[in-house]
């Protein structure tokens, strides 16, 4: 397998690409060849994704966010609550006054997995996540997270956009709006949905809201020949390839140029011609990026990419590393889908009935992929410049759901962790009460996570604004503080 | 953590003893004001208002901040201003930045407060009480005293001349017809229309074209898109469980029709806000209220969760969405900014926001039955039947029989039968349950005279999803009823001659059945009664029978909503089945009963929501002999004609299989009082507010009434307030919206924000002139279009080299040219279909679903290419899904319908290039396009020319023709057509 330089700068690179296309990918991407005839990059002034300098020096160049949708239970994973364990089986709400999202609380239920201390930092982690436990010294935990909604849809929107209502730009959109992209050949904001389906709230979780559509997340499929929708015509059109396609493109360009020349007042016409050149670059880069076959056997093993259950998420994590390696600004990986037709195991972390069954399954998925990602980023020297964030829309209750083995929604407490990209590893910020029921020390909403992430990327969350219907909107609304305690 | 709140006090006791002692009043202007200005005003002044507090002028200081008053004259120890200076908590202590105040400064402030906090007013204080925001341009009355010569062109040229600029010349005719056609219809002109327009020598050719286009039904389809953008209309709920709204489309069709028929804009607005109340007999006005419900709605938050807190939160967000939509769409005021605090820019208070919320407090989104036609037919039928019963005699009163009587008035009022035991009595029951439902209990009349054997029995009906789980109701060896609806299996009260227990009233329409001359048969769910028709026939020597009765819901409209079902059986056959009746519904029933039928059974069931409030009743339920009419021939004739009329009405009623519905709302007539929610938090309620609007627009009083005002009247009052001719905003806003869509930018570039944070008008006089003409023209939107598109300003070329103008006004705010524009996503899709010859111009009806739908907890939508004509209708008829945007259209900048979108954002991206090149839709249509031109104009050159005509409405230049021929020769017409659909000229308008 050939190794591809990130930016084609010489004829050897071009030759390599051509070889790649002809041999590795079965001759797709003829249009891309046309692009190679014209190596001039798009004009910055007309490219909304041209790289921009932030407000201050950045620690992180890129973000990989792992989103555990369905709501991950903090008390079974990262938030060690020995008192809860002691009270297991005792009433959680003796007065019977409380009402959760779907139930009245049952008895206290300690973590279903034992906790131990790990690493130099001695942070606690449960046995559910044995591989991630080995990474605690890279991770900064924010244990005092809260959400403004206990409903999946609004809470997903809040975690992604800062607002419980739909229609606001997601963090990835804000980041590419603020910083543009370092990579012309791939989308700036890439989303890797769970192979089981879209998360609660659907594709608008990575929507651009009122920002220009160029900032919306682009979903990439990690398998198949068309990683991006419409990257190539479907197989029913085998003729739209190669030299024939180049002829079409030349025809298009010839007529477009003549049309633009007669309309010097309209600069958008030139931008649209450039967009076709960018599209050709994308046709070349995207299949190369999603083709994992060139990774070493050790890497494939690290991510368990062939495992039936945990492999798909491992592939997403590996792909995220490859994307960031190529200059993609923001990658969002979803670990869990929407509550679709329920099979044996829930299709996400929403463990209302059986925490052991569902978190048992999903814990292994997350553990394998996320631990591999941290290790792999480190070995590629990318962890320093890549901020990894792992979040969920809210947490779960320390009490059992009714008399069952599940846990109900808990918007008053959950944990987010960050690693790499200027974050101080092995530390923790904020805490919950002795049962893990409510955030008590430094209660924090997603605003602070967003403010901190933007800060590490060199952006001031109060200055990253966009006018919409009467308001200079921000990702952090009127809130947000950088959590300086977790900065390296 | 350091939490002992007493410590600062202890500390203060120590410190205060060390402070220099000061006595007597201080001069505010020399001692205190400079201190405030130097150390406080930076964060608590005109620029920033931390904690919503200002200390730069007296009225603000006295008003206080987010936590209330900060100054208690005479009591420094109770004044936050002072306490915050001496706090030991660094996060609390003021000033937040810089050194703390010196001890002597602190002492001065203490002394100033303790001696009464005298604050002599200076100019700054006085200015602060006079709110300059009240002078903001958009809330001033419209300027209307224009000279008769004033016009769009005169006003635009005047401002151009001031800047030393001249307008551009008129565009050529091809450009004009293309521009006009896309602007007004969203569709291209045909090559033939272009040719005929170019050839038209009539000096009025352009005006004629405008009239033709404005009269086209496609006009409404185009402009409805703009209105639905600001209504954020879609056909699903959005949020997590993004369910279908199968009836939303009727509102979309209302908008199209209203625009096509040029419904006066003031009425258009009133319909959409309160049409159900203002025009109760107009179906279209009821449908129009779908506007209020057009936005997203969270099923999980409103319905599924069991948590009251979460429900309140979802409801607060829901009403915020609704009132924001109404106020921004109609008046361009960003009212949502006042939800958590007073508006930061505009003089709109938080209280006023909640006054508007009170207007909508009784509005609950949901399907609303459109039963205006049925109700009207039933009223007619009731009148005809009243006349008929005059001829037939009174017959037997079934309520009287339930009361132990013979049907002629011998029964006891209020008496009735217990459905569990069959026992007769009058005592009130309020809950009945049985282990043995569906068992017919013969009536047991222990203490009354032997009644006629007209009642076969009573029973408590119970159905089940699986009919095998419950036994049927056995009426006779060969008569069993097995299809009762699924119910709770409980009941409320006995079946009575009169109201059931706790039933407040018994009205249908304007008849009160509790008054004398009428009867009420009370039948709450779940209960059933069977009459023995053979016994009735033989006692009266009757043959075939006729049943007439009204069926109503006896709970008041203001009671909590409730459903109930009503069924009538003849033997085991269900003849009448009304499911999920609500208390606003009623029906009038006429049933012909043949000789052979033995049993008549009435069944009330709970509609699946429990038995509460299910107080159904039969009004004037009578059995008549169909043959009882007198032999006199005149009477016979009259009977025949009334009977025919009745039959016709019954037939018309029977044809209404199911009442249509629109996704709009159902009302709570008297909603709970509305309170301010501090910081927008529904769990932290403050002052009570009454329905009203905001005072900034001062054309009408902003107070609508108090809590006793029914919700419909509240909306009606708001509709009147918004559409008052003197409202300064409404007419400016719509005039600007039209301008925006005709020029690609508005005179005000923030079409939904006319407040202080919005844009200033580039041509204030022109905007007022347009609004004035609009009012003079009877609110005709088409007239406004015509004014705009016939102006020379609109007809200017967009491609005029003018370096002076470009230098002075590169963004063309002064309108020295027309703006080139790009087609939006929907127009592009329609255009592709149009030139491929596959566009299906069928108008109206349910949205086409170009996706596969999979039912699931959260439904799954997977898009498919438009393979059938149904899926090739215009984009306005698309079934719009919120959570799963249409990938092709959203790539082309189709906005997320979660947002109110007054102006579309346009981007140019690589993904657009890919979509337009490779999307299955485009490729399929390119193939159709190729087939079309080949068959219309065979041969390469003619086909190429035809393609240019269809796509660009012109012939190819020689070089274009040569290049095209080369491509077609090498690869065929399909490849060529695919590239035509990707041309800049295809999607840009000059």
Image (cartoon, rainbow, N blue to C red):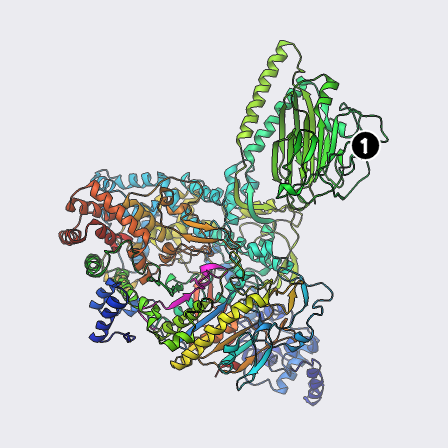
Position of residue A247 measured from the top left corner of the image (x, y, whole percent): 19, 59
Q: What kind of element bears circle 1?
A: loop
Is B171 displayed left or right of A77 in the figure?
left
Position of residue A212 measured from the top left corner of the image (x, y, whole percent): 38, 62
Query: In the image shown, does A66 or B894 lie closer to the viewer?
Result: A66
Extreme residue toward the bottom, this view: B18
The stretch of residues the image draws in magenta is A182-207
Q: Quadrant of residue B489?
A: top right
Is B183 displayed left or right of B268 in the figure?
left
Chain identifier of the residue bearing label 1 in the image: B
Label the magenta part by its dominant secondary structure. Answer: loop
The count of marks equals: 1
Question: Residue at point 82% right, 30% down?
Answer: B445
Q: Can residue A131 be seen in this view?
A: yes
Position of residue A271 measured from the top left corner of the image (x, y, whole percent): 28, 63
> The N terminus of chain B lies in which quarter of the figure?
bottom right
Q: Is residue B319 visible?
A: no
Q: Residues within 10 Å of mark 1 (few under 14, many from 20)?
A: some
Position of residue B575 measured from the top left corner of the image (x, y, whole percent): 61, 30
Instruction: Tell me if residue B95 comes above or below residue B145 in the rendering.
Output: below
Query: In the image shown, does B730 or B834 lie closer to the viewer?
Result: B834
Q: In which quarter of the image is residue A35?
A: bottom left
- Is A183 magenta? The answer is yes
Instruction: Tell me if residue A464 comes above or below residue A99 in the rendering.
Output: below
Question: Residue at point 38% right, 59% down?
Answer: B905
- Is B593 magenta? The answer is no
Instruction: Tell me if residue B473 comes above or below residue B49 in the rendering.
Output: above
Q: Name the residue under label 1.
A: B444
Is B439 displayed left or right of B383 in the figure?
right
Query: In the image shown, does A21 or A67 lie closer to the viewer?
Result: A21
């Amino acid at each position: 397998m050939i190794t591809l330089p990130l930016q084609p700068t010489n004829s050897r690179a071009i030759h390599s690409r051509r070889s790649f296309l002809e041999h590795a990918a079965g001759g797709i991407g003829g249009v891309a060849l046309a692009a190679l005839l014209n190596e001039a990059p798009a004009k910055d002034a007309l490219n909304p994704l041209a790289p921009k300098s932030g407000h201050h020096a950045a620690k992180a160049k890129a973000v990989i966010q792992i989103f555990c949708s369905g709501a991950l239970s903090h008390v079974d994973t990262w938030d060690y609550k020995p008192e809860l364990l002691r009270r297991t089986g005792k009433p959680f709400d003796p007065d019977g006054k409380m009402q959760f999202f779907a139930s009245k609380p049952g008895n206290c239920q300690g973590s279903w997995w034992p906790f131990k201390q790990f690493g130099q930092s001695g942070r606690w982690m449960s046995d559910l996540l044995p591989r991630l436990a080995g990474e605690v010294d890279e991770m900064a935990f924010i244990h005092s997270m809260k959400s403004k909604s206990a409903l999946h849809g609004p809470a997903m929107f809040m975690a992604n956009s800062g607002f419980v209502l739909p229609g606001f730009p997601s963090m990835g959109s804000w980041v590419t709006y603020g910083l543009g992209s370092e990579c012309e050949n791939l989308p700036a904001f890439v989303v890797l949905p769970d192979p089981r389906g879209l998360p609660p709230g659907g594709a608008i979780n990575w929507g651009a809201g009122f920002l220009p559509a160029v900032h919306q997340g682009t979903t990439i499929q990690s398998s198949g020949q068309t990683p991006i929708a419409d990257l190539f015509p479907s197989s029913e059109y085998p003729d739209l390839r190669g030299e024939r396609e180049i002829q079409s493109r030349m025809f298009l360009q010839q007529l477009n140029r003549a049309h633009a020349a007669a309309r010097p007042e309209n600069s958008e016409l030139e931008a649209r011609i450039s967009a076709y050149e960018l599209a050709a670059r994308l046709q070349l880069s995207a299949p190369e990026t999603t083709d994992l076959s060139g990774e070493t056997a050790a890497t494939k093993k690290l991510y368990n990419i062939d495992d039936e259950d945990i492999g798909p998420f491992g592939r997403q994590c590996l792909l995220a590393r490859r994307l960031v390696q190529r200059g993609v600004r923001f990658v969002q990986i979803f670990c869990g889908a929407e509550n679709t037709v329920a099979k044996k195991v829930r299709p996400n972390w929403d463990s209302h009935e059986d925490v052991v069954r569902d978190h048992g399954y999903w814990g292994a998925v997350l553990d394998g992929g996320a631990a591999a990602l941290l290790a792999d980023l480190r070995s590629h020297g990318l962890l320093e410049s890549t901020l990894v964030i792992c979040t969920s829309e809210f947490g779960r209750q320390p009490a059992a759901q009714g008399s069952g083995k599940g846990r109900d929604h808990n918007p008053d407490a959950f944990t987010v962790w960050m690693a790499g990209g200027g974050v101080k590893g092995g530390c923790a910020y904020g805490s919950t009460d002795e049962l893990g029921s409510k955030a008590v020390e430094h209660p924090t909403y997603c605003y602070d996570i967003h403010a901190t992430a933007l800060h590490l990327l060199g952006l001031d969350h109060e200055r990253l604004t966009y006018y919409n219907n009467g308001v200079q909107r921000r990702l952090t609304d009127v809130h947000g503080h950088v959590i300086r305690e977790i900065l390296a | 953590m350091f939490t002992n709140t007493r410590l600062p006090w202890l500390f203060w006791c120590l410190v205060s003893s060390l402070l220099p002692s000061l006595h007597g009043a201080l001069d505010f202007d020399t001692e205190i004001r400079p201190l405030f200005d130097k150390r406080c005003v930076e964060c608590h002044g005109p620029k920033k208002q931390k904690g919503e507090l200002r200390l730069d002028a007296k009225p603000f200081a006295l008003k206080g901040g987010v936590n209330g008053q900060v100054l208690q004259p005479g009591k420094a120890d109770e004044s936050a201003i002072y306490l915050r200076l001496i706090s030991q908590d660094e996060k609390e202590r003021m000033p937040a930045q810089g050194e703390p105040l010196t001890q002597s400064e602190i002492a001065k402030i203490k002394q100033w407060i303790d001696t009464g906090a005298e604050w002599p007013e200076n100019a700054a204080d006085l200015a602060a009480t006079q709110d300059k925001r009240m002078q903001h341009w958009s809330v001033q009355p419209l300027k209307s005293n224009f000279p008769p010569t004033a016009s769009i062109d005169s006003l635009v040229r005047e401002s151009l001349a001031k800047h030393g600029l001249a307008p551009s010349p008129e565009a050529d005719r091809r450009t004009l017809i293309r521009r006009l056609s896309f602007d007004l219809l969203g569709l291209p002109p045909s090559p033939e229309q272009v040719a005929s327009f170019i050839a038209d020598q009539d000096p009025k050719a352009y005006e004629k074209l405008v009239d033709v286009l404005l009269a086209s039904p496609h006009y409404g389809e185009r402009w409805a898109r703009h209105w639905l953008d600001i209504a954020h209309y879609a056909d699903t709920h959005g949020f997590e469980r993004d369910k279908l709204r199968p009836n939303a489309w009727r509102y979309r069709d209302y908008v199209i029709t209203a625009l096509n028929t040029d419904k006066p804009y003031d009425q258009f607005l009133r319909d959409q806000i309160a049409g159900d109340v203002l025009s109760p007999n107009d179906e279209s006005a009821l449908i129009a209220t779908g506007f209020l419900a057009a936005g997203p709605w969270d099923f999980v938050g409103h319905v599924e969760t069991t948590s009251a807190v979460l429900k309140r939160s979802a409801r607060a967000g829901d009403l915020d969405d609704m009132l924001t939509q109404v106020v921004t769409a109609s008046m361009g005021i960003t009212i949502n900014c006042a939800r958590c605090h007073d508006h930061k820019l505009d003089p709109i208070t938080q209280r006023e926001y909640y006054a508007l919320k009170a207007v909508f407090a009784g509005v609950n989104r949901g399907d609303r039955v459109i039963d205006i036609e049925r109700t009207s037919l039933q009223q007619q039928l009731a009148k005809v039947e009243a006349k008929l019963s005059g001829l037939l005699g009174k017959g037997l009163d079934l309520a009287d029989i339930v009361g132990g009587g013979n049907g002629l008035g011998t029964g006891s009022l209020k008496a009735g039968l217990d459905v569990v035991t069959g026992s007769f009595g009058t005592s009130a029951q309020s809950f009945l349950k049985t282990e043995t439902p569906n068992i017919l209990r013969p009536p047991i009349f222990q203490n009354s005279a032997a009644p006629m054997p007209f009642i076969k029995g009573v029973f408590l009906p119970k159905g089940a999803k699986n009919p095998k789980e419950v036994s049927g109701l056995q009426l006779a060896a060969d008569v069993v009823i097995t299809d009762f609806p699924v119910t709770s299996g409980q009941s409320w009260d006995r079946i009575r001659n009169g109201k059931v227990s706790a039933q407040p009233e018994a009205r249908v329409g304007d008849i009160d059945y509790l008054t004398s001359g009428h009867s009420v048969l009370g039948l709450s769910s779940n209960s059933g009664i069977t009459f023995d028709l053979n016994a009735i026939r033989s006692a009266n020597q009757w043959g075939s029978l006729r049943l007439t009765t009204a069926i109503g819901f006896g709970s008041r409209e203001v009671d909590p909503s409730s459903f109930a079902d009503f069924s009538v059986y003849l033997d085991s056959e269900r003849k009448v089945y009304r499911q999920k009746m609500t208390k606003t519904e009623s029906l009038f029933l006429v049933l012909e009963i043949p000789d052979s039928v033995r049993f008549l059974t009435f069944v009330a069931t709970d509609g699946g929501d429990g038995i509460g409030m299910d107080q159904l009743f039969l009004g004037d339920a009578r059995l008549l002999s169909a043959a009882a009419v007198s032999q006199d021939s005149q009477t016979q004739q009259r009977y025949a004609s009334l009977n025919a009329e009745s039959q016709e009405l019954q037939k018309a009623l029977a044809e209404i299989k199911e009442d249509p519905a629109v996704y709009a709302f159902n009302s709570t007539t008297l909603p709970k009082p509305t309170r301010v929610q501090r910081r927008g938090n529904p769990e932290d309620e403050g002052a009570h507010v009454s329905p009203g609007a905001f005072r900034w627009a001062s054309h009408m009083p902003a107070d609508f009434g108090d809590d006793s005002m029914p919700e419909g009247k509240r909306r009606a009052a708001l509709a009147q307030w918004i559409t008052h001719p003197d409202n300064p905003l409404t007419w400016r806003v719509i005039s600007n919206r039209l301008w925006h869509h005709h020029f690609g930018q508005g005179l005000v570039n923030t079409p939904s924000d006319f407040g202080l944070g919005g844009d200033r008008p580039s041509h204030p006089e022109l905007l007022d002139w347009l609004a004035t003409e609009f009012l003079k023209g009877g609110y005709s939107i088409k007239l406004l279009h015509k004014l705009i598109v016939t102006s020379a300003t609109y007809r200017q070329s967009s491609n005029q080299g003018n370096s002076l103008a470009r230098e002075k006004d590169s963004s063309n705010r002064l309108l020295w040219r027309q703006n080139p524009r790009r087609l939006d996503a929907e127009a592009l899709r329609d255009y592709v279909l149009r030139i491929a010859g596959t566009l299906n111009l069928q108008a109206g009806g349910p949205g086409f679903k170009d996706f596969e739908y999979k039912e699931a907890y959260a439904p799954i939508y997977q898009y498919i290419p438009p393979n059938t004509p149904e899926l090739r209708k215009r984009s306005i008829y698309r079934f719009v899904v919120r959570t799963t945007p249409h990938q092709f259209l959203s790539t082309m900048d189709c906005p997320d319908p979660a947002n109110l979108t007054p102006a579309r954002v346009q981007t140019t991206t690589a993904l657009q290039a890919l979509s337009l090149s490779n999307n299955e839709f485009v490729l399929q249509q390119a193939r159709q396009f190729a087939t079309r031109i080949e068959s219309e104009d065979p041969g390469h050159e003619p086909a190429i020319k035809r393609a240019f005509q269809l796509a660009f409405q012109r012939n190819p230049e020689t070089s274009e023709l040569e290049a095209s021929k080369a491509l077609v020769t090498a690869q065929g017409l399909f490849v060529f057509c695919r590239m035509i659909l990707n041309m800049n000229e295809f999607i840009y308008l000059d």
